Image: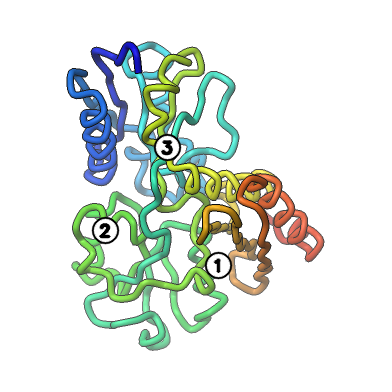
Amino acid sequence: MNNPPSKLVIASRESALAMWQAKHIQQSLQALYPNCDIEILGMTTTGDQILDAPLAQIGGKGLFIKELETALLDGRADLAVHSMKDVPMNLPDEFLLAAVSKREDARDAFVSNRYQKIEDLPAGSIVGTSSLRRQSQLKARFPHLKVETLRGNLQTRLRKLDEGQYDGIILAAAGLIRLQLGDRIRQLISTDDSIPAVGQGALGIEINAQRQDLLEVLAPLNDATTHACVAAERAFSRALAGSCTVPLGAYANSADAQTIHIQGFVAALDGSTVLKNQLVGQLSQAEQLGASLAQALIAQGAREVLNDYQ
């Protein structure tokens, strides 16, 4: 580009995983713009501070990005790096999603010190997870297990497991892999058995909508296939008013960068009802495909299931 930036500030949460993500983007930008001074502004968000209640009860995943967005608006930061699964389905008009980087493994991972896979857990075993999405799918498949809420950053969750508070926990594989903790994974759970969170495994770069100059700067970091797949998942969730207060998930992938396969579900929290469906279409029509999948689930009765969460 003609005039590469002389300085960029990246806003990030201060957890180990969030800082890894910010540093990953920092290094990618530094390779593109070696003369640019690239700093990371670490911040503690409301979602990081409130650890004694389920996310669904305290306002949802948007709590993890509010402070970062404030830094974008007041000029303290030029861009913010997020796990896409933490980004609300409707961004305010003041912000733009400038890029989505290539996705890491999107699957859920089973972590345990005693058991090799979820199927090995005896009746009454305690499984920890922070997600209504995971809870509902676990209860549907394994009604004999006891599912309990697990909050905190990745290291805190692993510590609670190691202290014996849980027989096993479910985490996003991507976070463990990125922090070089992949050896803790006992089982990678098929997306057919545990449909991931919308955007799981993908990183998003958010900017102030007034900073159109940054679109060209960040364009090389965008992976078009990942961006389209995540857009399909987000369109699915948006059509169903999805948030972390609703047991809902979607996963889209493309094997050839031309077609896209998307699967999605909604469920009752106790697992008594699980509605699933899937569609295949053109990658260029990703968002429309996601919305169509939502309509297919609505035809199956999704609205009635979701009404319980209003």
Q: Residue at x 55, y 57 (%)?
A: 252
Q: Residues within 10 Å of mark 3 (few under 14, many from 20)?
A: some
CA–CA distance in space, label 2 to label 3: 21 Å
Q: Residue at x 76, y 60 (%)?
A: 296
Q: Residue at x 42, y 72 (%)?
A: 189
The residue type indicated by label 3 comes to Asn
The residue type indicated by label 1 comes to Ser
Q: Position of residue 28 (x, y in %)?
A: 26, 35
Q: Which mark is residue 136?
A: 1
Work out which residue is located at the far right of the displayed protein and give it. Answer: 299
Instruction: Please give the residue where the numbered disc 2 appears in the rendered image.
Output: 177
Instruction: Please give the residue where the numbered disc 3 appears in the rendered image.
Output: 222
Comes first in the chain, label 1 or label 3:
1
Query: Is 288 in front, or is 156?
Result: 288
Q: Residue at x 68, y 62 (%)?
A: 279
In what element is the residue under mark 1? helix
Comes first in the chain, label 1 or label 2:
1
